Image (cartoon, rainbow, N blue to C red):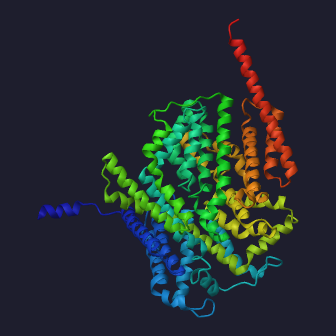
């Protein structure tokens, strides 16, 4: 008895950090089960679904992200748990206790209770604090500025003046309706985005990621500069099922970057190629980045329609990066790498091709008109089946615990996106209340004197600058709310205008000074982050040109006749070939100064100009320089063979 007492006294108490891990795990598991259940039975009423979703996501943010990065608050403290419980109880109140009364009231007409007001104000503060922890001060400052405008707009003179609002009205707008925090952005997070995050986690668990790497190496590994081409193909394949640039870098880069360095690529180029290829994953269907779901909501189209429209620009981008990699290999005379397992791609496809089943499931179900969240559910089920098949074929037992951990991990990955969407809801709510979006769009048009060639760079810079300090979703939401209306007022196709903003938000990930994807790749390559980011941006030059092409040539988003679509795609292919060659300075042999300048200029002009005659002249110039470069390469090869032959 005495021994037991001593043992109990010596046993260490559970620390707050350890306790928070358990809490995060169980809430994440509960969130995953809830979302799977509603995806199978049918999504709940809008306000109910969104408040329940945030009831799981928002409290977790306070335990996942510490109050500070340094010092005492860099680990979990009692203050984090205080935030956790206060947020949890507030959302339980809205989603359960007061839900029946709130859903029956007429917004801005029926009076609400004092406790409703307190809960609403607290939740706005909680969302800002969670955003500060998860995303940083950038988005918080913009949210605070938006709220300040709502309250102080009556003191501003001129076009941006506003009659002002009250604290009661703003609290109701933000939390007691679907026009603020629980608006369209959280709706996307609660349905499509969360389920696709789960799908991505289960896909990795099924072993599909390694299959993509293996088949990419078998296809391109032995070719000239093979490992770099493998990085492009593998990132392209991974991009079809993963919407995260950084996740693509870490999953494929750990294998491809060392191989690139091994065959002779400079570390900075190896990192830049991986960053460029992985960033494209956010624009490649069928699983694009989280912002794409928000885009579909904004534009009012189905997700499968968006996937179809975004497919051609995404493929053109990967073709451009592949060409750049090949031209660099030609310029530096690099060889391929040996295939270690020695298996041809056909055999890999035959023996492991079943691992691509979830990808086929998600495409087929969405084409058949199944809602995106349910298509993700069916794909998750197919991943589970794959795991069970693998366990039978390999003899490796898979425990229930592994599935449970996968569920919790997938839910945990959705927390930052949910918090970002909630913060974006504050901005959208203010924009809806004050009309700042329309005012800002009108101001842009006046400032640019209605010149589209001045407005487009302004929107581009807004997307790039916001994307440097914010997640792509947050950057896109703000540009879509404030700047994109300026493009649509100029008569630009709505989908093309939103894709324009989205693409530059995505490619801010490889745009210095804050090039997150490039910095992750630089860490794996052992290169300087800023140099890697700069080179990645240069390799990805077509990515900064293609969005302009979408604006002037809607055929690239499959709008037009079959002949128009085919013709524009063919011309743009020639253009991205020329841009890649001009950026690297090589084609079949290195390009000389004047020819490099001409081909780069003509390629850019032919892609973005709406004038068909100018396009055809520039296209002819690019083809002529390419043919001349090929002839010179063939001539040089014959001369070398003549010199090497015996007299």
- In this view, which residue lies farthest toward the left? 1
Residue drawn 76% across and 39% down?
582
Residue 466 in view here: yes
Location of residue 24 (image quadrant)? bottom left
Residue drawn 53% across and 65% down?
193
Residue drawn 52% across and 71% down?
190
x and y, in percent, of residue 14 in the image: 32, 63
x and y, in percent, of residue 129 in the image: 55, 70
Q: Nearer the viewer, residue 51 or 319?
A: 319
Relative to 388, say whether 27 is above or below.
Answer: below
Relative to 581, say whether 15 is above or below.
Answer: below
Residue drawn 33% across and 59% down?
401
User: On the rendered image, what quadrant is the N terminus found in?
Assistant: bottom left
Residue 483 in view here: no
User: On the rendered image, what quadrant is the C terminus found in?
Assistant: top right
- In this view, which residue lies farthest toward the top? 647
- The total of numbered circles placed on residues is 0
Relative to 225, say whether 271 is above or below.
Answer: below
x and y, in percent, of residue 263 in the image: 56, 30
Specify whether 77 is left or right of 567. Answer: left
Specify whether 396 is left or right of 151. Answer: left
């Amino acid at each position: 008895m005495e021994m037991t007492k001593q043992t109990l006294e010596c046993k260490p108490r559970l620390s707050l950090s350890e306790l928070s891990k358990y809490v995060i795990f169980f809430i994440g598991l509960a969130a995953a089960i809830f979302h799977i259940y509603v995806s199978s039975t049918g999504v709940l009423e809008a306000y109910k679904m969104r408040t329940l979703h945030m009831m799981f996501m928002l409290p977790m943010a306070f335990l996942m992200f510490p109050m500070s990065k340094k010092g005492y608050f860099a680990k979990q403290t009692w203050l984090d748990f205080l935030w956790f419980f206060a947020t949890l109880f507030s959302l339980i109140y809205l989603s359960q206790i007061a839900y029946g009364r709130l859903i029956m009231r007429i917004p801005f007409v029926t009076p609400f209770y004092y406790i409703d007001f307190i809960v609403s104000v607290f939740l706005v503060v909680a969302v800002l604090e969670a955003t500060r922890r998860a995303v940083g001060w950038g988005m918080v400052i913009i949210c605070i500025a938006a709220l300040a405008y709502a309250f102080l707009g009556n003191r501003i003179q001129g076009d941006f003046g506003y009659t002002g609002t009250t604290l009661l009205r703003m609290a109701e707008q933000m939390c007691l309706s679907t026009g603020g925090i629980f608006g369209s952005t959280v709706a996307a997070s609660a349905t499509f985005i969360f389920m696709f995050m789960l799908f991505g986690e289960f896909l990795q668990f099924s072993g599909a990621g390694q299959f993509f790497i293996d088949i990419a190496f078998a296809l391109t590994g032995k070719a000239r500069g093979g490992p770099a081409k493998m990085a492009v193909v593998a990132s392209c394949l991974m991009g079809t099922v993963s919407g995260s640039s950084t996740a693509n870098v870490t999953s494929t880069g750990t294998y491809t970057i060392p191989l690139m360095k091994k065959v002779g690529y400079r570390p900075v180029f190896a990192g830049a190629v991986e960053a460029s290829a992985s960033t494209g994953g956010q624009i490649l269907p069928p699983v694009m980045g989280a912002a794409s779901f928000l885009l579909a909501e904004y534009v009012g189209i189905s997700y499968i329609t968006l996937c179809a429209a975004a497919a051609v620009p995404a493929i053109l981008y990967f073709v451009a990066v592949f060409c750049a990699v090949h031209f660099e290999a030609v310029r530096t005379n690099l060889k391929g790498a040996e295939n270690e397992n020695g298996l041809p791609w056909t055999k890999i496809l035959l023996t492991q091709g079943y691992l691509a089943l979830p990808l086929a499931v998600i495409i087929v179900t969405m084409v058949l008109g199944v809602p995106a969240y349910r298509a993700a559910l069916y794909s998750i089920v197919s991943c589970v089946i794959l795991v069970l098949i693998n366990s039978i074929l390999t003899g490796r037992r898979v425990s229930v615990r592994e599935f449970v951990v996968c569920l919790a991990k997938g839910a945990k990955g959705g927390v930052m996106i949910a918090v970002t969407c909630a913060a974006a809801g504050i901005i959208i709510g203010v924009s809806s209340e004050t009309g700042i979006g329309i005012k800002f769009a009108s101001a842009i048009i006046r400032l640019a004197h209605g010149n589209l060639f001045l407005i487009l760079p302004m929107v581009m810079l807004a997307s790039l600058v916001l994307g440097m300090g914010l997640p792509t979703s947050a950057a896109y939401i703000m540009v879509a709310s404030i700047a994109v209306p300026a493009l649509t007022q100029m008569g630009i196709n709505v989908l093309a205008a939103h894709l324009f903003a989205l693409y530059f938000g995505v490619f801010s990930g490889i745009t210095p000074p804050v090039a997150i994807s490039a910095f992750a790749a630089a860490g794996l390559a052992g290169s300087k982050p800023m140099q890697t980011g700069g080179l990645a941006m240069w390799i990805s030059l077509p990515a900064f040109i293609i969005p302009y092409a979408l604006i002037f040539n809607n055929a690239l988003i499959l709008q037009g006749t079959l002949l128009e679509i085919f013709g524009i795609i063919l011309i743009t292919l020639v253009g991205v070939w020329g841009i890649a060659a001009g950026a690297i300075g090589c084609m079949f042999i290195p390009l000389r100064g004047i020819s490099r300048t001409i081909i780069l200029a003509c390629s850019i002009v032919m892609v973005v100009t709406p004038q068909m005659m100018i396009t055809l002249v520039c296209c002819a110039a690019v083809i002529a320089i390419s043919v001349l470069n090929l002839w010179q390469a063939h001539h040089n090869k014959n001369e070398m063979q003549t010199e090497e032959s015996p007299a």
